[in-house]
Image: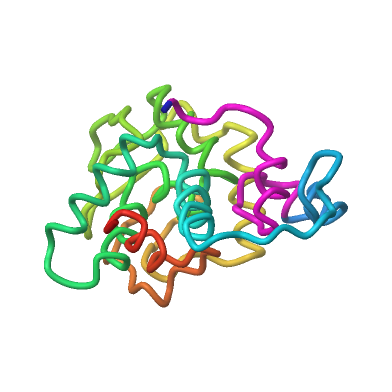
Amino acid sequence: MARYRGPVEKIERRFGVSLALKGERRLAGKSALDKRPYAPGQHGQRRKKISEYGLQLNEKQKAKFMYGVSEKQFRTLFQEANRRNGNTGSILITLLETRLDNVLYRMGFASTRRFARQLVNHGHVLVDGKRVDIPSYAVKPGQKVEIREKSKKNPQILRAIELTNQTGLAPWVDIDADKVFGIFTRLPEREEVIIPVEERLIVELYSK
């Protein structure tokens, strides 16, 4: 299944929660979810009873859309999390958080993960001084992530830095906003990652 490229605000309305798919509009309280907090479509305001499977599927879909990964990528990450020792759901979230596009977003150099992915794809991002153009690249603790010199004056990047300075940054990254680089200092603890996803239900879904 290919990555979703359609209207993202419909996705948030469908699930009834913000998935950080919009940048400035979301931070300004102007997202479609704020104006119409119900599912899109003719019958969007009707209450629907969701089965146990439906709840589990919804959680997986929310995580996929939020982090911008395909079905194949998500399944591969789950299999890797399942192989490791520890809580599979928490490890899955940690693996998603170490993706380069997500780290760039957490550092505040992009207002959305989608824009962060675009920056990586177009070669605007360096990791430890070397260009990396793979959004799924797993950043390791201690690595330096920066915007290349020619792109540091990009108005969208500067605006993202301005917005995130107002809302705060993730505690597992340390950035220099003036020089537009950051250090991925450590892996995040699950309780630090504030996302509207119950990974326990994802584990249950894949365990069937």
Q: Looking at the image, is 14 positioned above or below residue 156?
A: below
Exactly how many numbered labels are in the figure? 0
In this rendering, position of residue 180 left or right of residue 139 = right
Identify the residue at image location x=52%, y=44%. Answer: 65
Identify the residue at image location x=47%, y=29%. Answer: 3
Q: Would you say residue 6 sits in the magenta stretch?
A: yes
Q: Would you say residue 47 sits in the magenta stretch?
A: no
Looking at the rendering, the stretch of residues picked out in magenta corresponds to 2-26
Q: Quadrant of the N terminus?
A: top left
Q: Looking at the image, is 53 positioned above or below residue 116?
A: below
Q: What x and y, as percent, mark residue 130?
A: 23, 33
Q: Looking at the image, is 48 positioned above or below residue 70?
A: below
Q: Looking at the image, is 197 positioned above or below residue 178?
A: below
In this rendering, position of residue 121 left or right of residue 9 = left
Q: Nearer the viewer, residue 3 or 47?
A: 47
Q: What x and y, as percent, mark residue 110?
A: 54, 43
Q: Quadrant of residue 43?
A: top right
Outermost residue on the bottom side: it is 191
Q: Nearer the viewer, residue 127 or 21?
A: 21
Q: What x and y, as percent, mark residue 66?
A: 52, 48
Describe the colour scheme in one phrase.
rainbow
Q: In which quarter of the image is the C terminus?
A: bottom left
Identify the residue at image location x=26%, y=63%. Answer: 91
